[in-house]
Every structure is written in structure tokens, then in C-alpha cells.
Amino acid sequence: MRPQRIRPRPSNDGPDATDRRDQVGVLITAIDLHPIQVTLSELIRELTLDPADFGEQDRVRRAVRDLSGVGLLHRHDFRNRPDALVVPTRAALRASELLGDDE
């Protein structure tokens, strides 16, 4: 698996570039871990340097929300706990295969 930790954002990066980088990191990690189903909190621990830092948690949460919104991730919320299961969609997996990102 590729190391995809989300790095602290450089000061010259705009918010769009940072959001895009965060989304790429989340999507690649979800695809690399597939067929393992991970929770949102597990993704946060995997991708951040300090999982307790609200700013880093928020970046991963926003990336998952945005990727779910465009149909690249499924997010399944649990009824009995404040977490969610996160898995790539078939479209994301197929795009990864076509782009040769499954190495």
C-alpha cells in the first residue's frame, strides 16, 4: 500500500488545491484497502499525523463527504455509534483499474 498521509497544508496552497489533495489521499487509501471495509475513524487514523487534531479530522471528513457526493465513495452511517463505514464505489474501483492505479 502507498503511504498517503495527509500532510499539513503549505501556506501557498489555496483551499481548492488542498481539498483536491485530501480527496485524492482518501480515495486512493479507500481503493488500496478494498475489499477491507474501513470506518471513518480508521481512515482518519490512517491518513493524519495527529488523529486527535480537529483540523486534520475535518479535512478527512470533508473529503469523504465530497467524494460520497460525487459517487466515488459509499458512506454508511451506523445507528448506534457516531461513525460511518466508508467503501469505494464500483465506479471508483473501475476508474482505478482503467487508470492503472491498482499497482
Image (spheres, rainbow, N blue to C red):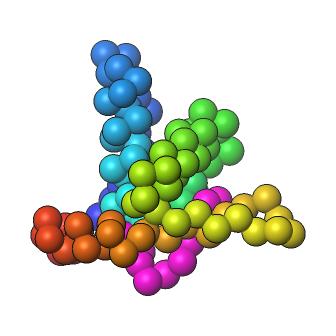
The reply to whether the magenta stretch includes residue 65 is: no
Query: Looking at the rendering, in which quadrant would you find the C terminus?
Result: bottom left
Q: Determine the residue positioned at 49% across, 50% down.
A: 69
Q: Judge from the rendering whether residue 41 lies leftward or rightward of residue 80; answer left or right.
A: left
Q: Quadrant of residue 12?
A: top left
Q: Which residues are magenta?
A: 31-41
| Res. 4 image quadrant | bottom left
Q: Position of residue 3 (x, y in %)?
A: 33, 59
Query: What is the x, y in percent for residue 54?
Result: 66, 36
Residue sitting at x 70%, y 64%: 77
> Residue 85: where, in percent of width, then height?
62, 69
Q: Is residue 12 left or right of residue 34?
A: left
Does 78 sit left or right of 50 as displayed? right
- The answer to whether one can see residue 42 in this image is no
- Residue at position x 64%, y 68% in the image: 76
From the viewer's side, name the closer residue of 103 and 72. Answer: 72
- Name the quadrant of the N terminus: bottom left
Magenta residue check for 34: yes
Of all residues, the one furthest to the bottom in this rendering is 35
The answer to which image quadrant residue 78 occupies is bottom right
Is the residue 18 above or below the residue 48 in the image?
above
Question: Residue most toward the right?
Answer: 80
Relative to 10, does residue 7 appear above or below in the rendering?
below
Q: How many discs appear? A: 0
Residue 57 can be seen, yes or no: yes
Q: Nearer the viewer, residue 78 or 43?
A: 78
Give the residue at x 49% y 81%.
36
Spot occupied by residue 25 in the image (x, y as percentages of width and height): 37, 52
